[in-house]
């Protein structure tokens, strides 16, 4: 008997489909409503599907953890909505970031089970781990939807991008979590790869306590 | 201003999705109804999407042409339905092969605009170019749907597989186009990569003509 052997371990998978209808996009989202992978990005008929790799997921979780620790120390309310889908049928665009947070607008979505961009504000902060060959440019979609801030990690460096007149510009300091800077984020991400996890958490917490903004 | 630069040239793309409903599969097929790429394979909730590469497509077209040439010399009617979608909702399976032919059952589908497996027979011969890491095993799907013969290209070698008691086994000769066999197909495929096209076509035609007498005597 001849058989095709499917592989057990599949690396990052990625595909771009053109000519996908909004109906098919919504149908796929409905099938995957309870799973965080893969990520679907939709831009006027183009659909990109990406299954992230493990190192990708680790940097994502590290950055999200930093947000959680710092906001706790600074007594800032935050809602982490993970990689939930944000979509706007009127704009024919939709995306699922690696992690998304409501910070400045947390109160407006507090307790809401479903977040809909037609009535709710866009997320305040997104974490985006760069993939090698993105087929769809994500930033113009985030800009169109009105996401204020994006933290982007390209492996060794974290950059902070802030929306300014419809485009993202690189800045040193986070808008949502000032005075947190790109340099500090980069250092924490690199530290997280070497340090013991409890020690790393203590170091982030210690930094946050020292820097606690006067509010 | 910061921008993400989308890749201009993308290689073979492939993804597999779990937990995809039949409704979603059909909705995607409807979006792609007049296109031959990408290929969708569906197997009970799993959906694989593959965009073939150019060398892949070249081999595929070459074998497709070989079938047309040989069949014409042998006065055998064929219908090439390309990479049409074959699906069976009752089995929750569907596929789009690289090339698909009706040969023995050509008469039954000759005038059909759309082929529907709930009323029409399965295709008689498929061409499948192996992809590096198939996420869904295709042969069990072809077997379930009842495709009697598959030609599989694995790099440089063409294998003729015939359905036998629900499984594919390598066969000494093609079922639909005997006495074509794996060795002859492998040789013609290799030659197609170096010979001028017109010379290659003449060689295939000459071989088919030489075999026609032998075929007639065995009928």
Image (tube, helix red, strand yellow):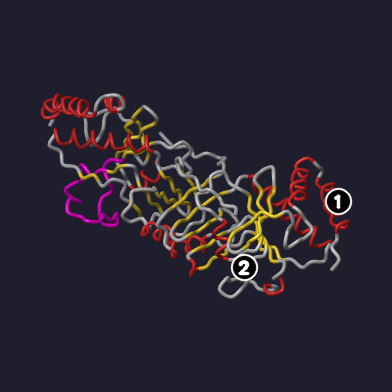
Q: Secondary structure at mark 2?
A: loop
Q: Chain of mark 2?
A: A
- Locate the C terminus of chain A and report the quarter of the image it occupies: bottom right
Taking the magenta stretch, the answer to whether it contains residue B107 is yes
| Chain part drawn in magenta | B101-126
Front one among A18 and A154 = A154
Q: Are marks 1 and 2 on the same chain?
A: yes
Question: What residue is rendered at 31% in x and 54% in y?
Answer: B34
Residue A214 percent across, percent down from the top left: 86, 66
User: Which residue is label 2 attached to?
Assistant: A122
User: Which residue is label 1 attached to?
Assistant: A202
**Left-right relation of A166 to B132:** right
Q: Secondary structure at mark 1?
A: helix
Question: Looking at the image, is mark 1 or mark 2 nearer the viewer?
Answer: 2
- CB under 8 Å between callouts 1 and 2? no
Residue B102 percent across, percent down from the top left: 23, 44
Q: Where on the picture, by quarter, is residue A75?
A: bottom right
Question: How far is the residue under mark 1 from the one under mark 2?
Answer: 32 Å
Q: Where on the picture, by quarter, is residue B63?
A: top left
Front one among B156 and A181 = A181
**Left-right relation of B132 to B57:** right
Front one among A173 and B199 = A173
Residue A152 percent across, percent down from the top left: 65, 51
- Locate the N terminus of chain A and report the quarter of the image it occupies: top left
Question: What residue is rendered at 63% in x and 55% in y?
Answer: A98
Q: Chain of mark 1?
A: A
Mark 2 Cα within 10 Å, few/some/many (few <14, many 20+)? many
Taking the magenta stretch, the answer to whether it contains residue B214 is no
């Amino acid at each position: 008997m001849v058989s095709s052997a499917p592989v057990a371990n599949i690396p990052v998978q990625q595909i771009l489909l053109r000519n996908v209808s909004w109906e098919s996009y919504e149908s796929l989202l409905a099938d995957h409503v309870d799973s965080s992978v893969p990520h679907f990005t939709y831009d006027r008929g183009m659909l990109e599907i990406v299954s992230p790799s493990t190192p990708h997921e680790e940097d994502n979780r590290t950055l999200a953890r930093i947000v959680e620790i710092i906001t706790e120390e600074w007594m800032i309310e935050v809602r982490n909505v993970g990689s939930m889908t944000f979509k706007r049928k009127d704009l024919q665009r939709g995306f699922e970031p690696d992690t998304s947070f409501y910070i400045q607008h947390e109160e407006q979505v507090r307790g809401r089970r479903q977040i809909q961009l037609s009535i709710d504000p866009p997320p305040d902060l997104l974490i985006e781990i760069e993939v090698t060959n993105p087929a769809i440019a994500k930033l113009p979609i985030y800009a169109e939807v009105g996401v204020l801030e994006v933290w982007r990690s390209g492996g060794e460096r974290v950059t902070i991008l802030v929306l300014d007149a419809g485009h993202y510009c690189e800045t040193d300091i986070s808008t949502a979590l000032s005075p947190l800077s790109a340099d500090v984020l980069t250092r924490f991400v690199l530290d997280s790869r070497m340090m013991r996890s409890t020690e790393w958490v203590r170091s982030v917490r210690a930094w946050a306590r020292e820097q606690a903004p006067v509010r | 201003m910061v921008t993400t630069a989308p890749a201009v040239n993308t290689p073979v793309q492939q993804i597999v999705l779990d937990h995809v409903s039949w409704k979603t599969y059909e909705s995607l097929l409807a979006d792609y109804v007049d296109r031959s790429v990408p290929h969708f394979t569906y197997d009970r909730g799993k959906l694989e999407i593959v965009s073939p590469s150019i060398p892949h497509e070249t081999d595929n077209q070459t074998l497709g042409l070989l079938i047309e040439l040989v069949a014409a010399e042998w006065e055998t009617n064929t219908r090439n339905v390309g990479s049409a979608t074959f699906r069976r909702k009752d089995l929750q399976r569907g596929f789009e092969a690289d090339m698909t032919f009706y040969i023995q059952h050509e008469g039954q589908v000759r005038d059909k605009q759309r082929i529907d497996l709930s009323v029409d027979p399965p295709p008689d011969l498929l061409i499948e170019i192996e992809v590096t890491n198939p996420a869904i095993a295709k042969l069990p799907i072809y077997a379930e749907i009842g495709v009697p013969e598959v030609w599989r290209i694995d790099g440089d070698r063409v294998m003729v597989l015939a359905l036998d008691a629900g499984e594919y086994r390598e066969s000494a000769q093609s079922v639909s186009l005997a006495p074509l066999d794996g060795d002859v197909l492998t040789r013609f495929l290799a030659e197609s990569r170096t010979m001028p096209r017109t010379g290659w076509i003449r060689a295939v035609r000459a071989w088919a003509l030489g075999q026609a007498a032998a075929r007639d005597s065995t009928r």
